[in-house]
Image (cartoon, rainbow, N blue to C red):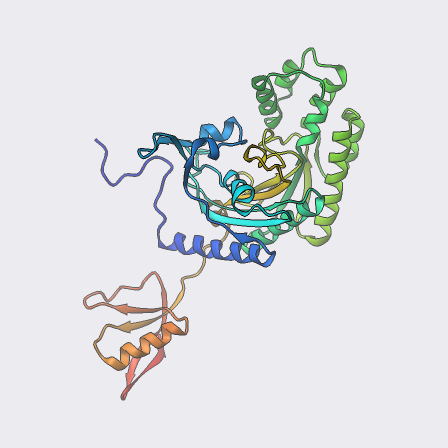
């Protein structure tokens, strides 16, 4: 029998130091999104399953905890990703005709961790633009993503660009069952050329050659020229490569400290994305710290197929990539019924100071803070004294 205080695997309490860091990140990221004109929404943690999984594909279905509503008998799900919920809000609750910018920050729950070291309860922050199909929205989302990560304290960022249309153009005219397509996409993600060679047996020559070329098409801007030579001539592929070049040019101009690269075989979320997509990498992180892109079909199942582009990140991953914050400066005060002391404490707190009252018999209380000053009596008054 397990101990009552043990938590499930890959679920953990957030202790004070980390909680302060996460809350600081949350506030900073929401403030940054607000400076771009994004409005915050708070979707529920629990929804009817068919709404929660609308248009998301099998991958999200497998990550979603499911249960039965004792009030209605219907199947419910605990969200594993907030994007479908935000698409529902845009489509049915706001129902605006023009551009809508929305952001959110809250926990999601996964049935399985995405890596051996990751949590099953990420704290997801995201931002999304609805209603504009042009590249201007893609660029704004990428700008916000990079500004947010820099504001969070991450440096030496790498932006990898890709596009779901490249694979769609390469496979145009090739009949594939959903399971076969999923296997092919997985082999692409792993850059498993041997498996791709086996899976593409019988494909048209152009599609097969393009498919086998994709795992090698990664690097700097020169990759786009190489892709034009080695991939099939197709309108989707040409448009995708043009868009990637445009985005890379603008990002490099505004974010000179960010290294921009391309990985045309990166097809994570292929069933979900409809156009340009991106991932941001940072030193100290085993995988991308942020992912996003264009997903114009996300609202179709809600009856309102609006252009959409956005990104999301896990604040717990971000917190692990930045240096720990120094302890917060605080004022130490003895506990007392003295009215003047209590008034001094209230006045300091109103001014934004942290005042830790040391309760009787607890002289070491407040060690989580850097108590660099204390309140001491000076005649009928209480004054601050440096420690």
Q: Is residue 4 left or right of residue 328?
A: left
Q: In this view, does 123 lie to the left or right of 195?
A: left
Residue 76, image x and y in percent? 39, 33
The image quarter containing residue 260 is top right
Q: Which part of the image, by quadrant, shows the N terminus? A: top left
In the rendered image, the residue lying farthest to the left is: 361
Residue 261, image x and y in percent? 68, 40
The image quarter containing residue 2 is top left
Residue toward you, 314 or 77: 77
The image quarter containing residue 122 is top left
At x 48%, y 53%, the residue is 26
At x 79%, y 34%, the residue is 225
Is residue 107 shown above or below 21? above
Residue 384, image x and y in percent? 35, 79
Is residue 223 shown above or below 150? above
Is residue 189 shown above or below 133? above
Residue toward you, 322 or 186: 186
Residue 131 seen in render = yes
Residue 156 seen in render = no
Residue toward you, 124 or 53: 53
Residue 319, image x and y in percent? 47, 49
At x 45%, y 58%, the residue is 325
In the rendered image, the residue lying farthest to the top is: 202
Q: Which part of the image, by quadrant, shows the C terminus? A: bottom left
Q: In this view, does 58 lie to the left or right of 100?
A: left
At x 53%, y 54%, the residue is 29
Tell how many labels: 0
């Amino acid at each position: 029998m397990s101990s009552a205080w043990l938590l499930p695997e890959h679920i953990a309490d957030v202790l004070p130091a980390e909680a302060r860091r996460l809350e600081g990140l949350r506030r900073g990221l929401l403030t940054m999104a607000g400076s771009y004109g994004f409005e915050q929404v708070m979707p529920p943690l629990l929804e009817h399953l068919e709404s929660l999984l609308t248009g998301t594909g099998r991958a999200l279905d497998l990550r979603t905890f499911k249960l039965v509503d004792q009030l209605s008998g219907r199947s419910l799900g605990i969200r594993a990703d907030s994007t479908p919920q935000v698409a529902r809000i845009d489509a049915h609750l706001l129902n605006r005709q023009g551009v809508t910018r929305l952001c959110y920050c809250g926990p999601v729950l996964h049935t399985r961790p995405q890596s051996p070291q990751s949590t099953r309860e990420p704290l997801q922050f995201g931002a999304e633009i609805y209603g504009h199909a042009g590249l201007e929205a893609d660029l704004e989302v990428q700008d916000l993503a990079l500004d947010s990560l820099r504001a969070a304290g991450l440096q030496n960022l790498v932006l990898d660009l890709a596009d779901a249309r490249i694979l769609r153009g390469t496979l145009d005219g090739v009949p594939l069952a959903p399971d076969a397509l999923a296997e092919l996409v997985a082999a692409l993600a792993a850059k498993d050329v041997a498996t791709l060679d086996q899976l593409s047996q019988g494909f048209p020559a152009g599609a097969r050659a393009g498919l086998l070329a994709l795992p090698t098409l990664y690097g700097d801007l020169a990759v786009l020229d190489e892709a034009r030579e080695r991939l099939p001539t197709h309108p989707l592929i040409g448009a995708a490569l043009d868009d990637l070049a445009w985005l890379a040019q603008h990002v490099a101009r505004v974010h000179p400290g960010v290294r921009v690269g391309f990985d045309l075989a990166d097809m994570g979320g292929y069933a979900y994305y409809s156009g340009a997509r991106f991932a941001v990498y940072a030193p100290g992180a085993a995988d991308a710290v942020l992912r996003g892109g264009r997903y114009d079909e996300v609202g179709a199942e809600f009856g309102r197929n609006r252009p959409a582009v956005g990104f999301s990140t896990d604040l717990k991953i971000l917190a692990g990539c930045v240096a720990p914050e120094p302890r917060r400066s605080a004022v130490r005060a003895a506990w007392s019924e003295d009215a003047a002391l209590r008034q001094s404490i209230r006045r300091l707190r109103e001014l934004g100071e942290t005042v830790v009252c040391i309760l009787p018999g607890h002289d070491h209380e407040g060690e989580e803070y850097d108590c660099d000053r204390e309140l001491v009596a000076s005649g009928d008054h209480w004054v601050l004294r440096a420690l």
